[in-house]
Structures are given as C-alpha cells and as structure tokens.
Image (cartoon, grey):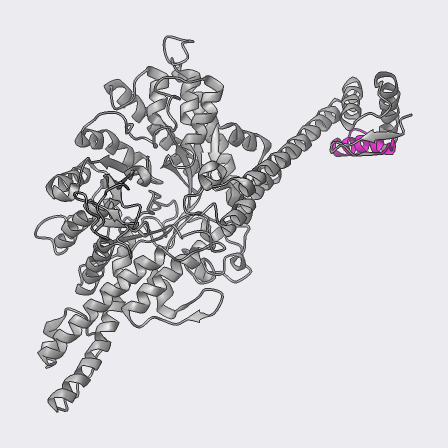
Amino acid sequence: MFKRIVKRDGKIVKFDPEKITEAIAKAGLATEEFKHDRAKALAEKVLQRAEKEIKARTPNVEQIQDIVEEVLMESSFKKTARAYIQYRQERSRIRDAKSDLMMIYRTISHAAASEDSDVKRSNANVDGNSAMGKMLQFGAEGSKVFAKSLLLRPDIAAAHDNGDIHIHDLDFYATGTLTCCQSDPFVLFEKGFNTGHGHLRTPNSISSYGALAAILLQANQNEQHGGQSIPNFDYAMAPGVNKSFRKALKRNLAKYNKFTKKKIELEVKDNYEYGDDKKLEKAKWPKEVVEASNEDVERETLQAMEGFVHNLNTMHSRAGAQVPFTSINFGTDTTPAGRLVSMDLLQATENGLGKGETPIFPISIFKVKSGINYEPDDPNYDLFKKAMQVSAKRLFPNFCFIDAPYNLKYYKKGDYRTEIATMGCRTRVFASVFPESDGIVTGRGNLSFTTVNLVRIGIKHGICLGERKEADWDGFYKELDEKMDLVKDELLERFDFQANQHVRNFPFLMGQGNWFGSEKLGWNDTLRDVIKHGTLSIGFIGLAETLVAMTGKHHGEDEDSRELGLDIITHMRERCDEYCKKYKLNFSLLATPAEGIAGRFTKLDRKEFGKIPGVTDREFYTNSFHVPVYFPISAFEKIEIEAPYHNLCNAGHITYIELDGDPSQNIAAFEAVIRKMHDCGIGYGSVNHPVDRDPVCGFSGIIKGERCPHCGRLEGDVPFEKVCSCAKGK
C-alpha cells in the first residue's frame, strides 16, 4: 500500500485510501446508482489495480483518478462513470482557469505600459498604468474566471473562450449590473436626488443644472457597466436657463432702481422665460433690464456648457480609474431657452478643452428632424448648420435621424420621450414588446449583449479554404441558428441573474427612480418587473469578411454579395423577432462595433485557419455591416449600401464616412453627406476626418500651415501628429 501521494501543486502528503471511497460514494449518490457499501467495494478494486499498475512508490493524484475512471467504466454504473469524468473535467477546467488568471495578473502587474498588453488595453476609458486602473483590471480578470467557472453553462463558457461568441462585459456578469441607461434629468431634478452621500436639492440655475447633469451621469456609471446617455439634453437644461433668467431679472431690476433712483416694483412670475420679450414688455419691464438679463443668462449658459464638457472629461467613476462614457442628444427643443442650450453646447465643443484639445466626452449627438431643424425655414435650422460646422472641426456631434421610417413611426410632436436617441457608440433602445415602454427612449437601456463570430461560420462553410467550389449555405444558416440559440440561452440566463438583484443593489439607478418604472419598487424588491423594459442584444461582426469567405467578394464590390449580406442580416433579425414573441422580452439585433473584439476574433481564427486573403489577413474584422475602410468607394455609394442594415439592426447601428483633408473648408460637401444619410434612411451617422495634434502643448484639432494655433510653436524638429479618426469606430 502506498504511504504518500503527490498532489497537483507538488506537495507530498499522507496517502488516505478513504478519500477514494468518499469520491466514488459522492458520484454514486449524485446519480443515485449506488450507496456507500458499493463505493467501498469499487474503491478496493481501484487500490488493487493501482498497486499492480503504478510502479512509482509515490503516485500522483492524476494516476489514481485515471484508475477510478477505468474501474467505473468497466462496472455496470455507466451513469456514475460519465458523471465522475465530467466532474473531473470541470475541476480541471477551473484549475486551468485559475492558473491562466495568475499569468494575467502577472501581466497586469509587470507590463511596463498599457500598450504592452491586450489585457491592459481592454477598456479605452481606463488608464491601465495607474494604480486604480490596475486594481480594476485585477478585479475584472478575476471576475471573468468566476463567471466562466461557476455561473455560465460549460458549453457557453467554452464558446466564448474559443471565439465562437463573445460575451461583452463578462467581468461584470457576477455583479448583476445592466449595460446602459438613457437618463431623464427631468425625473431626477424635479425633487432632487441622492447619490448615496447626501441629498442634492432641485437645481435653481443653469449652472447647477449643468453641474448636476454631470454628477447624475457619473453616479449612474458607478452602477452600470456600459455608457450613460441623456436623450433630451436641451429640453432638460432649458428650465435651468429660465430659472437663471428670472434671477437675473430680480438682480438687474435692483441695479436699475439703484442707478436711476427709481422705485419700480415688478413681480418676477414663474412663467417668465428667456426670450419671451413680448410678455415682459407687456408687463412693463424696462428694456434695459431685459437686455441685461438676457446677456447675463447667455454668458452663464455658455459657462455652464463649458463646465459640463470639462467635467465630463475630468471626473472619474469606478474607483477613480475611468472617465464615464457619456453621450447627450439634443437639437430639437425650439424654445429660446432650449435653443440657447444647444447653441452654447456646440460652442463649448468647438472651443475645446484648456489647451484646445478636442473633447472626448460627451459624445454629442444632434437629432435631425424635418420641420424642426432640417430645412432653411425650420426654427432650429441655424443649429443644424452650426452642428455641421463644429463636427467638421471637432469630429462631433454625430447625427441621429428622427425621419428614418423606423424612428418616425414612434414620433409624437412635442413629446421628447418619442424622439429617437442613442448611446454614443451606437446602442439604440426604442421598440418594446410592452406597450407602456414601446417607442419610449427615457429611463431605458440595454441589459446585456453578446456577439456571434459571423466570420468563423463563413470560413467553415465558404469557398475560402479551397475545400469546395460553392458555398454551403444550408450549413452556414444551420450553424448560425445554433450559435444564435446558444447566445439566446446565455442572455436569458444572464437576464435571470440580473432580475434577481434588488433595488438596494442599485441605490441610484433604481433607488432614485432613474430606470423606467423603478419608482414603484421598494428597497428590497427584485428587478424583474422593470428591467424587462430593457433590451437583450445579439450582435455580429465582420459581415464583409464573412461574404469574402463564402463567395470571394464583399458587399462593397459585388451586387450579388450585397444581396447575400442583406439576406444574412435579415435572417438574424427575424430570429431575434422570434425570440421576442416566444420569451416576451426585447431581443434585438446589434451591429457590434469593431473595438475590443474584432482583433480577438481575427487572432483566434487566424490561429485555427491560417492567413486567408481578404478574411484573416488584417488585424481587425470590419465593423458590423460596414463596407471595409480599405476599399475605395464613394461616400454616397457607401451610404446607399449600408442604409438598409440600419432598419434591420434595431439594437444599434452607425454609418461612418471618411473625408480627406479639412472638411471645415468645404461645409457644403459635409452637408451633402449628412443630407444623403437623411434621405437614404440612415438612423445614425458620423463623419470622420483626420485631426492634427501638437505633441508639445497637447492641442488637438486642425492645424493649418506650420504653426500651432494654441501655443504658436513652429513645427520644426518636433512634427505635428495626425490623429487617426478611426478612434470613433473602425
């Protein structure tokens, strides 16, 4: 009989035969095939065989367990044998994951810079070199291992690891957080709100409105793993303008009386609003007082918008390591106060940050609507023109089109909740299987999303490997359905996990009534009844490479491939719609951005299938349904090809157009692109162009000639840099 045994960690401990009996007994008990007495007899067989077959005086654990498997398989207890083998494999997978985790931790701890490691580059908003950034990454990587080992089904975890699918924000799976939220400041500002460290009363000036808008975005970011959006920024800030205006009236009337020696006594009514000069004239307010008050509030509003932009580029969330990913939608409030907010927000964006840098946040989105700002006779047409001028210089705002048919059908004039809005990257939450939230943007968001590696399916069933002359479309769609069903199962499991969280777990998002319907819940209530209004999204990446793999050509270069591409994405959308009906939840199709996963998928597929021209021979798969950026094509043709996909991808979409040179010198061309997007039914669009950067002073923007417009430095020995505009999306 053996006296000692070698454990997996190399330690040598006393050999205890009873542990073999216990392990077999647990397996038999689990399958209900036998009890302890039978386990003891089986253990005796294991020991007898071990003594004969193991020549070493000190065996290792793996050798003993191999013999346990053999004895069980030779017995009549086949069910127990399979359970024991499966349990052993699962334990092995968990141990391997822990080992891999230690290597990842070493990378986080020892890599010299974030550029040295894919792990440290996993989130562009996190400084991977800072102490708190490292702390977040330690937690994130450990959380992923926990989720894959104990929360996910083994087949789903394996599909993620091998690159068949990608579960986004897997590091937040175990926290039960939701992805994002479109917050309505009206709800939070009406009675004030509590961030967990004290109550903030209702703001009473545009300065306070701007400051609290930044704070609510930061507070919400701390309870979610995705981006934060305000869908009605101009509407929400307008009351702050009017409150500041009424304060200015009181203040300037007092000054007027002091300097004129008059004793005019006029009541400042709550219905007095900025720009409503006729009402003030009728009430016999001195013209000088009104003009001075207008000037005061205009100056304060610009300062408030500049402060808002500066706050969102400097404040941090999540242990101080991450700038909140924020977006704001605006441009459709036609009141003087709302128009002032939009104009000054655009001006603040154009002005840039302290050294003239282009602001990264908020991602500003101008909502385009015929009858409001699209035609020369529209009341906000000047804002539309200003938005294009600013975007031509600063890359933002992007443009969201209410007139797209699938957006317009929900639009109700005067109801900002029915105006389509988006998260900055592309996420769209609008339609709903629940009538009360159908066509409502405020208070809703995405719950979670997972992406299918569409390209891999194309490689396996297409002509690119030379194994067949014609694509196997039946096999392609069969496997696509299998992967979509797998993702659907994962999203449902994650939904159940999220639904069993409590309001107390999200004291701001749910406790302050920020999420749709959450104001009706108690502190200890679970979330199922309200998070059902969010979306569960299935994404895809690399349609272009998929088509090349299947047919040899992508949709930008071939008419037949163009039709096939639409067939694939139509099929995916129809499957999502079927899931909606079957499960009574908001399943939707997402045009997944390339950032983060396109390189991972490419690397895994190149390792398995080799370097395939037009498929795996670049560092990234193409963003969602986009025509590849390297393919020469006119802006108008690219828009025409991509527009139909916007209607299909109801969870989110975007079309990027790349312009050469400085578009601020040709606003007519810029406007032609935006109008083409509008007329073709694009839902969300952006125009990219090169941006210059002075590495000495930090200025980013357009540098004309050889002199930096911020510091006045001549280019000389330290050349200006060209910042790739693809930072907005590959």
Identify which residue is drawn at 40% across, 24% down: 455
- Rendering coords of residue 140 (x, y %): 53, 44
Magenta span includes 17:
yes
Q: Is residue 81 left or right of residue 274?
A: right
- Rendering coords of residue 280 (x, y %): 13, 76
- Rendering coords of residue 209 (x, y %): 31, 66
Above or below — where is 246 with respect to 104?
A: below
Residue 237 visible somewhere in the drawing: yes
Identify which residue is drawn at 33% across, 51% down: 361
Magenta span includes 159:
no
Q: Which residues are magenta?
A: 13-35
- Rendering coords of residue 277 (x, y %): 11, 72
Identify which residue is drawn at 85% across, 33% down: 36
Identify which residue is drawn at 18% across, 63% down: 335
Above or below — where is 264 with respect to 646?
A: below
Which residue ends up furthest to the right in the rendered image? 1
Magenta portion: prevailing SS class:
helix
